[in-house]
Amino acid sequence: MIKTVDLVKRFGDKCALDALNVEIYDGCIYGLVGSNGSGKSTLLRIFSGVYYPDGGTVSVDGYSVWNNPEVKGQIFYLPDSPHFFKNANLNEMADFYSGMYATFDRSEFDRLTTIFPISRTSKIDNMSKGMQRQAALMLAMAARPKYLLLDEAFDGLDPVMRNVLKSLLISGIEGGGMTAVIASHNLRELEDLCDHVALIHEGHIIFSDELEAVRGGIHKVQAAFKEMPPHISFEGMQILKCEKTGSLMQMIIRGEEEEILARINDLDPIFVEAIEPTLEEIFIYEMEAEGYDVKNILG
C-alpha cells in the first residue's frame, strides 16, 4: 500500500502539495485526475523517491521510499516526458533496466515487441513522441514492478495503442499482482479502466472513492408531468441540480436509483427515466455541490 499522511511539498513560495492524505491499496488501478499544476506529477515523483517531502510522511508497504533501493526496486515511474540515454535503442534500454530491476522479464519484453510496432535497434531519439511513449511503456511493463506510476499514460498514443495499454494494465493487475497509479487530466480516459478515482486540485485531494461507489451514487433523471408537482413533493430527495423546461424536469439526484424512481413515480409522471452520467459529469456535480468551480478545475 502507498500511504501519505499530511504530505507537504513546496517549491519556493509555491505549495505544490498541502497536507495531502491518500491511501492506495494493492491490486488496484488508481486514477489521479487534475488540471495542469494541480500536484499530480509532484505526488508521483514523491511516491517514486524523486522528490523528498517538506512535511508529513509517505510510505510504500510501510517503508520510506527516499534513499531506499529495495523499495525503489518495486516502483517504476514513467513521467510525462520519458527519458532515454542518448542514441540508445530499445535493446540497450532493456539491458539497462534488466540491471536495475531484478523482476525484469526478458520473455515478457520479447512478447511486447510483437505487440508494439517498435524497432528494437533504431535510435529512440529519432522516434515520434507516440513511439517513444510506446517504447517506455514496453520497458515499464517488462520490468514487472509491484507499483507502476504513469504520468499522462495515454499522451501521444493513437486509439488502438490506448486500448492495447489498457488491456496490458488490466492483465498486469489480474495476473501479476501489480498496482497502477495513473495521473491524467482526462477523466474520459480513465472511466472504463480504473477501480478507484481521485480528484486533486491545488495540492489537495478533494474527492476520492471507488469507481463503483461513484457511479452508483449519482443519477441523471428526466421526468415529464401534465402538471408540475409542487416543490414540497421533492422534499427529502438529495437533488444536486434541477432544470425545468415546460413540463420537463431534468435532475441530478444522489441516492439509490430504485428509491429515486419510486419517489418520482408516486408523483404520476407522464414518463420518467434514469440516465447514467459520465464520470466527468459525476465529478462536476459532486464538486459543484461542495462549492468548487470544477469545470475550471478540470480544464
Image: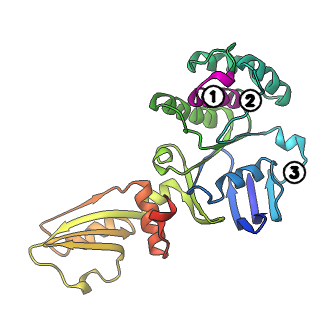
Q: Residue 257 at x, y = what percent?
A: 34, 63
Residue range in magenta is 124-141
Return the residue nearer the eye: 58 or 262.
58
Q: Relative to 270, is 181 above or below?
A: above
Return the residue at label 2: 84
Contact check, label 1 and label 2, Cβ < 8 Å: yes
Task: Name the secondary structure under disc 1.
Answer: helix
Q: Amino acid at mark 1?
A: Gln
- Seen at 47% across and 70% down, the residue is 293
Mark 2 or 3: in front is 2
Return the residue at label 1: 132
Residue 156: numbered disc: none
- Mark 2 vs 3, N-terminal side: 3
- Mark 3 vs 1, N-terminal side: 3
Q: Amino acid at mark 2?
A: Phe
Q: Residue 13 at x, y = what percent?
A: 76, 69
- Seen at 84% across and 50% down, the residue is 65
> 232 left or right of 198?
left
Return the residue nearer the eye: 262 or 150.
150
Using the rendered view, name the quadrant where residue 43 is placed: bottom right
| Residue 237 is one of the magenta-drawn residues | no
Badge 2: few (under 14), some or many (20 or more) residues near its Cα, within 10 Å?
Answer: some
Return the residue at label 3: 66
- Seen at 18% across and 76% down, the residue is 267
Return the residue nearer the eye: 291 or 167.
291
Give how far apart the Cα atoms at labels 2 and 3 are. Answer: 23 Å
- Seen at 8% across and 74% down, the residue is 226
Badge 3: few (under 14), some or many (20 or more) residues near its Cα, within 10 Å?
Answer: some
Give how far apart the Cα atoms at labels 3 and 1 are. Answer: 28 Å
> 186 left or right of 243?
right
Q: Amino acid at mark 3?
A: Trp
Using the rendered view, name the quadrant where residue 260 is placed: bottom left
